[in-house]
Image: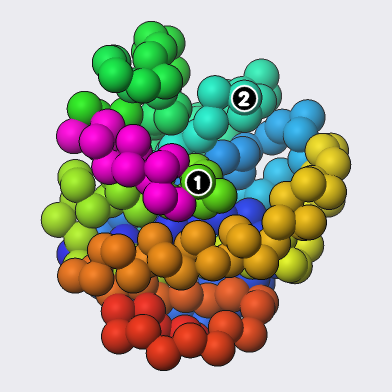
């Protein structure tokens, strides 16, 4: 199974380079909908909207992601969206409760998440989305866009100061590479604005 995961970096502009047509799911990481946290809605971008129109969509967001204006997005893609999760769990760590819109992540993600924050602590929701796909979607190939390690800008201006993340960009990049290497039985196809100079069998740089 092939899955696409979309972060929100400038390399989303490369979406039309994807030639793999047999895409089972697209996972959207955090606010692709109307939000006070971003100056423009991601789903209204022509490249993104064209890509999403015939795809099965899974939403994965942090609890702090704004959902006050999400309804227009949910109504537009109601026939596409099959799951909606927030990065909380039922036990052991980051324990929370589901709400009217978003479920908790499945329990089979918990142990991998605990390992993630211990071994690869600077990866965040996009890495959690990878784990979800690995544990629940029988995935063999993951295609990633919008992951620029805070060395490139977001596709659209954010109403949050990411100065700290930008200062740690090298560490973030290193943690992601180590994370991808850890799951060496999965092929990670990376479309980034960053010129990655690595030679690791399961990480395919495009």
Q: Quadrant of the N terminus?
A: bottom left
What's drawn in magenta, residue-wise?
108-120
Q: Secondary structure at mark 1?
A: loop
Which residue is nearer to you in this view: 96 or 120? 120
Which residue in the structure is indicated by mark 1? 121
Which of the numbered marks, if any, corresponds to residue 147? none
Q: Is residue 82 left or right of residue 39?
A: left
Q: Is residue 5 visible?
A: yes
Residue 178, position as x, y percentages in the image: 41, 66
At a point 19% along the width and 70% down the height, the residue shown is 185
Q: Secondary structure at mark 2?
A: loop
Residue 144, position as x, y percentages in the image: 46, 66
Which residue in the structure is indicated by mark 2? 64
> Can residue 113 be found in the magenta stretch?
yes
At a point 66% along the width and 77% down the height, the residue shown is 193
Q: Is residue 65 left or right of residue 186?
A: right
Q: Is residue 189 above or below residue 144?
A: below
């Amino acid at each position: 199974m092939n899955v696409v995961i979309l972060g929100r970096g400038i390399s989303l502009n490369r979406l039309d380079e994807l030639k793999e047509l047999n895409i089972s799911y697209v996972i959207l990481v955090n606010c692709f909908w109307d939000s006070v946290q971003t100056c423009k809605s991601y789903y209204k971008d022509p490249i993104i909207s064209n890509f999403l129109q015939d795809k099965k969509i899974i939403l994965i967001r942090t609890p702090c992601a704004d959902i006050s204006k999400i309804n227009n997005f949910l109504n537009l893609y109601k026939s596409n969206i099959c799951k909606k999760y927030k990065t909380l769990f039922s036990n052991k760590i980051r324990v929370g409760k589901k709400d009217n819109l978003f479920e908790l992540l499945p329990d089979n993600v918990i142990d991998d998440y605990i390992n993630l924050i211990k071994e690869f602590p600077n990866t965040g929701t996009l890495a959690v989305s990878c784990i979800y796909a690995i544990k629940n979607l029988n995935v063999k190939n993951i295609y990633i866009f919008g992951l620029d390690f805070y060395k490139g800008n977001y596709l659209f201006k954010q109403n949050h100061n990411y100065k700290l993340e930008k200062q740690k960009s090298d560490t973030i990049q290193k943690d992601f590479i180590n994370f991808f290497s850890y799951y060496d039985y999965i092929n990670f196809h990376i479309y980034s604005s960053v010129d990655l100079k690595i030679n690791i069998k399961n990480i395919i740089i495009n």
